[in-house]
Image (cartoon, grey):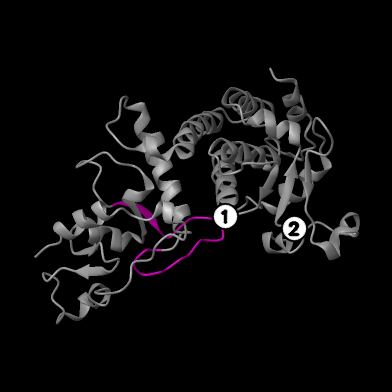
Amino acid sequence: MDTRLEYLTRLRVGQRKAGPAPNKPCLLLAIICEIQAGHITSPLVRIDTRLIARYHDLYELATGSRQMASPWLPLWHLRNDQGPTGPLWSPDFVPELASLSDQLGQPKSLDNLLARFASANLDAELFASLQDIHVARQACALLTQHYLTDDPPALKRLTDYLERALASGEYEKAPESLAGALQESSQQYARSAAFRVLVLDAYDYRCAASRLRYITPDYRYLVEAAHLIPFAVYPDDRPTNGLALTPNLHWAMDNHLIAPGPDHRWHVSPAVDALVPDNGWLCRLDGKPLVLPRNPRWQPTTEALAWRMDHLQR
């Protein structure tokens, strides 16, 4: 085992009736997953939607409760733990609070914490070791077995999730590998997970048609990742073959009632009767601009948009 991982067994964690509190282990597991996905690329860790949502996923698997996750607690208290070269976690406090950091009380919400710092530095040597997939797997096993073994079914759920997350991360780092036929059935979940994460992140969790963006307090998203060319037609899980859509508009597109065109506008099928009041939610979409990712790399391909237009009900 990489000796730098020994520090992960020395976390100062609280206790609950069932065993060690899962807050810090779940946060570190989330960080490991995001490192392996290529989302965290340096010891500087941004406290963003992806990381917090991943933490909620892991906390729910470990405890069965998503609402009690309280991410501000591990984000704050992890600074009291040691890493191979110094503090395991060093918050980047806003300048006016840097000198008062030791006097600040425990934050009471995520917004309260983010008013103090929105990023922190993970111990540089630990970060360097976690970039290796084999070391990352060791770290995940160490954290789960050391802190999260009190509930065997929960441990199994966590272990399965982490294995899939690490496999998905390999695809996220190389999205060009998400096209083409699957070689093994075990690849399907990892590829699908990578497609979902990349698409929703590219659209910043905003619907490409309605522009709606809503994330619940426990970090569930309103939007879904929708294929432009269906996977059954051509197995392409690259994010350029996807859109973020609310469930109702995802359904409407898959049933060819609406289509995004190469002109980057939405088109409504003539089969949708505009005189029926209940159809207004679809008809109002006709001619509206398609919401595009800010990064041109993830914008949908002309071929995929043309496929949708070709299959719009006439």
> Which three-letter amino acid code belongs to the residue tagged 2?
Phe
Residue, x 53% and y 55% (percent of image)? 219
Q: Give the magenta part as a residue range.
A: 207-227
Q: Count of labels shown?
A: 2
- Provide the residue designation for mark 1: 49
Q: Residue furthest left?
A: 314
Q: Is residue 199 above or below residue 34?
A: below
Answer with left or right where residue 182 lies relative to residue 276: right
Element carrying mark 1: helix
Element carrying mark 2: loop
> Which three-letter amino acid code belongs to the residue tagged 1?
Thr
- In what quadrant of the picture does the N terminus appear? top right
- In what quadrant of the picture does the C terminus appear? bottom left
Q: Which mark is residue 299?
A: none
State the predominant SS element of the stretch in magenta.
loop
- Provide the residue designation for mark 2: 117
- As for residue 233 lying within the magenta part, the answer is no
Front one among 204 and 301: 301
Q: Is residue 314 above or below residue 20?
A: below
- Badge 2: how crowded within 10 Å, few (<14), some, or many (20+)? many
